[in-house]
Amino acid sequence: MPQEPEQGAMSDTDIARFIDHTLLKPEATAAEIAALVAEAAELGTYSVCVSPSRVADAVRAIPEGSGLKVAAVAGFSSGAHRPEVKALEARLAVEDGADEIDMVLSIGHAIEGRFDVVEADIRAVRDAVPGAVLKVIIESALLTDERIIAVCEAAERAGADFVKTSTGFHPAGGASVHAVELMARTVGGRLGVKASGGIRNRETAERMIAAGATRLGLSAARAVVLGGESAGY
């Protein structure tokens, strides 16, 4: 995973390598996915993140030799799907060429404190895609600090590679510096931390990295890498 450079010394290339350039709107077309991939390759982002039905489109569009990875979501965006459904969705995405899976955990069970159910849900996906990088979206804006810690611990026990703040689709909000700091402290470098939701400019991105994020999920890659502001994911 990308390693954090010294604070204040981030080049455009440095920050680009933290980014999963993301397009998850349900109306996205094959042409828009191809444009996403082309922009990601131009900017040098780590990956693109797309819906499961668009993984094959993204894989076909990747320029040879770019090294660009493809991530797909599972159980998106509610997390309320049965574990078997998330597992199948993840496995099919990997068969289509996805390198990474960003799954939404069972948020209602997390709020209830049913961390055994949360862990089993994550483990079902982990078992289905043993060779893929697995990120677990916890929807941190909905959880107390105690529950954030508990779901991060459940994700680690279940074999996840990352914990991730948000889908970016919930009205409760996206990433916060506080949540990223708490998640990073909980996983202690054993897992990565992905900040996502509401990262629309370079300043916010650098604040998330300083807080402990090792990956950023956003649609505003051009604004973050080259400067400016975007109204995107």
Image (spheres, rainbow, N blue to C red):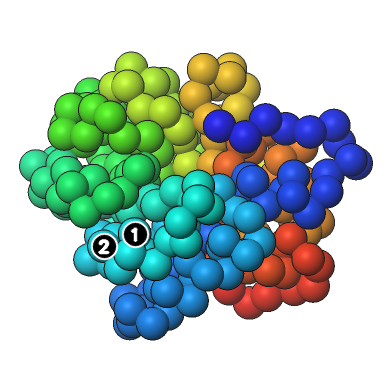
Amino acid type of the residue that numbered disc 2 sits on in the rendered structure: Ala
* Pointer 2 with pointer 1, Cβ within 8 A: yes
Is 138 left, or right, of 214 in this rendering? left
Residue at x-position 38% and y-position 51%: 71
Q: Is residue 166 visible?
A: no
Image quadrant assignment for residue 3: top right
In the rendered image, the quadrant that contains the C terminus is bottom right
Figure quadrant of the N terminus: top right
Which of 85 and 111 lies nearest the eye of the viewer?
85
Secondary structure, mark 1, is helix
> What is the quadrant of residue 106 in the picture?
top left
When the figure is inspected, residue 23 is found, relative to residue 89, above or below; the finding is below
Drawn side of residue 40 relative to residue 104, left or right: right
Give me the residue at 37% from left, 34% from top. 133
Which numbered dot is residue 155?
Answer: none
Give above or below for 113 relative to 140: above
What residue is disc 2 on?
56
Residue 1 visible somewhere in the drawing: yes
The alpha-carbon separation of the residues under discs 2 and 1 comes to 5 Å
Residue 228 in picture, x, y percent from top left: 79, 72
Check disc 1 and give the amino acid type.
Answer: Val
Q: Residue furthest right?
A: 8
Residue count near mark 2 (Cα–Cα under 10 Å), binned few <14, some 14–19, many ≥20: some
Q: Residue at the location (83% across, 48% down)?
A: 11
